[in-house]
Amino acid sequence: MESVKTPHRLAVSITLAASVLIATVLLIPYPEKAQSENLPENIKELLVKAPVPVEPFELVDQEKKPFNTARLKGVWTLMFFGYTHCPDVCPTTLTELDNAASRLNKINSGNNKLQYVFVSIDPQRDTPELLGDYVSYFGAKFIAVTGEHEQLKQLANPLGIQYKIGIGFNKEYIVNHGSAMLLIDPEGRYYARFKAPHYAEEIVAGFKSLKIHYGESN
């Protein structure tokens, strides 16, 4: 198996990586999970209590095209928040999601396609051009999006994703952020949440179960 390629800019200390992980636990208020006794345990662990529409937001993707709620309709969306200078959590997660995508794209043969969205919460460094270069290191056709902090928080905060610029010097700072992966359903609703650490097998199994619960057989 080929080793994962990562840009040189990911070379940040292990100490900073640990800070990201600790901050993730402290910052993220997880939403209530579905409580129905009739739900299988794997569904109950992932499904939010009541799917809610994603609130309006306006970002841009790596091609500088608008990315908003309209692009969440009629498609399943697996969404992860991070940044290109993240030392290990982000590239590891995107690698697992990339591995999952190679299988999900084969089994997701229904009317609603599946897209993979990487939201950068570090607009000072992560330009659309840089994001395009970064996600090209992974095989899946990721959509990479960003915007000003106020725009990002319009998307992130209602979904329970919080982040904060951390310690560092000049442009070598960390960003403390949530590590959950979110699933948006084809109606544009926040539907489920995958907790970290993320593994391709669990992403695939979880998504298949959630689709069946949603009413899609494949």
Image: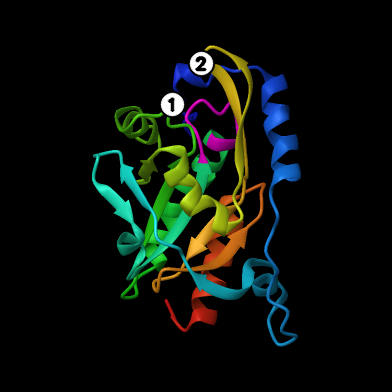
Please provide percent x and percent y for residue 137.
39, 32
> Which residue is the site of mark 1?
124
Q: Quadrant of the C terminus?
A: bottom left
Front-lying residue, 209 or 157: 157
Give the residues in magenta.
82-90
> Which residue is the site of mark 2?
171
Work out whether 199 lies above or below 218. above
Work out whether 135 lies above or below 56. above
Q: Is residue 100 visible?
A: no
Q: Are marks 2 and 1 in contact (CB under 8 Å)?
A: yes
Q: Is residue 67 magenta?
A: no
Q: Is residue 85 magenta?
A: yes
Q: Residue at x 34, y 68 (%)?
A: 73
Please identify the dominant SS of the magenta region: loop
Determine the secondary structure under disc 1: loop
**In the rendered view, does 39 fall on the left or right side of 103?**
right
Q: Please identify the quarter of the rendering in which residue 159 is found.
A: bottom right
Q: Crowding at label 1, few (<14), some or many (≥20) Cα neighbours within 10 Å?
A: few
Please provide percent x and percent y for residue 185.
45, 70
